[in-house]
Image (tube, helix red, strand yellow):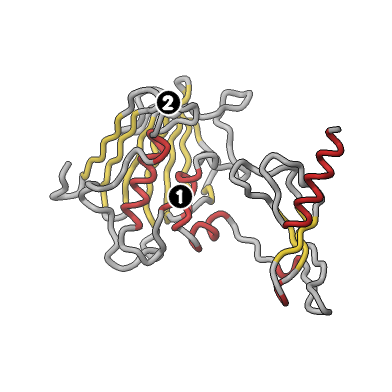
Amino acid sequence: MGGQSGNSDRHRAESSGRVEPGNSCEGMRLRVGRGSLCGDLLLVGRELSRSGSVRVALVGGGGIDGERRYSAADITVLSWDEAVRKRPAMYFGVGREHPELPTRIVAALMVDALHHRDGEHGQARVEVVGELRFGVVDDQVREMDGRGVPRLDHLGSLVDRRRSVQAAATALCARMIIEVWVGGRGFRQELAGMRPLAPPQEVASRAVGGPEGNGTLATYELDLSYFPRGAVVAASFEGFDMHGEWGAGRSGGGSGVVKDLRQGGAG
């Protein structure tokens, strides 16, 4: 019975070009596009995410009426940094040329810092120290490996890619320093974009302004050459939602503070 249902789901997907979240789709081919842009997609993920997205690989398959066939040579593979820089609006709501982009980045990082993955609210603080420089402190607990060391991403970075906003902001930096504390142990690393300049180093004392218990201090220096001339972090965040859609229905009481430490800042 289950096998018949699976085959039926697959048949409907292949016929309509749609797959419902949760259905197995490994090895399925879908016809996409029209005319010269028509080709087959081989679905290589085992199932769709709840959002309906799926990892795909273009495998050729021809088009129609003898039109062009596609291969891996027709696919452009972007690094994380390149993908974020190409479309920052996917993470921060505005494009590269928008003067509010630096302020939107800070606001998004505050939302990310306040809302823990377990549904609880946390404590967070942002300190703006330059036109495109700021630090974010939160009390989120980092996932550890079996040695009691923070789990690193595939580049050996302390930046947690499960926190996509934090990773996206790092991709727009000329320099970023991250310090992670868990269970009384601290680890520090410097990055250029998402690229670590060296492996994480264990530190004996906390940086000034760092988390008092478990948590992260991330200092961001946004890449001046990327942003439009005159774009700076705003002095006021009035009108920006610092809780975001994640805050709806979440338990626990959290608080976030933004301090402007620039000369003449609001403090």
The quarter holding residue 116 reads top left
- Tell me the SS state at disc 1: helix
Q: Is residue 183 left or right of residue 230?
A: right
> Against 148, is 237 above or below?
below
Residue 219 coordinates in the image, percent (x, y): 37, 44
> Against 195, is 256 above or below?
above
- Looking at marks 1 and 2 on the same chain, the residue that comes earlier in the sequence is marked by 2
Q: Which of the pair 71/17 is nearer the observer?
A: 17
State how far apart marks 1 and 2 are (Cα).
Answer: 24 Å
Residue 18 coordinates in the image, percent (x, y): 70, 53
Residue located 37% across and 22% down the image: 252
Q: Residues within 10 Å of mark 2 (few under 14, many from 20)?
A: some
Given the image, on which type of amino acid does mark 1 rest? Thr
Which circle marks residue 170 in the picture? 1
The nearer-to-camera label among 1 and 2 is 2
Q: Which of the pair 267/164 is nearer the observer?
A: 164
The quarter holding residue 68 reads bottom right
Q: Residues within 10 Å of mark 1 (few under 14, many from 20)?
A: many
Q: Which residue is mark 2?
A: 120
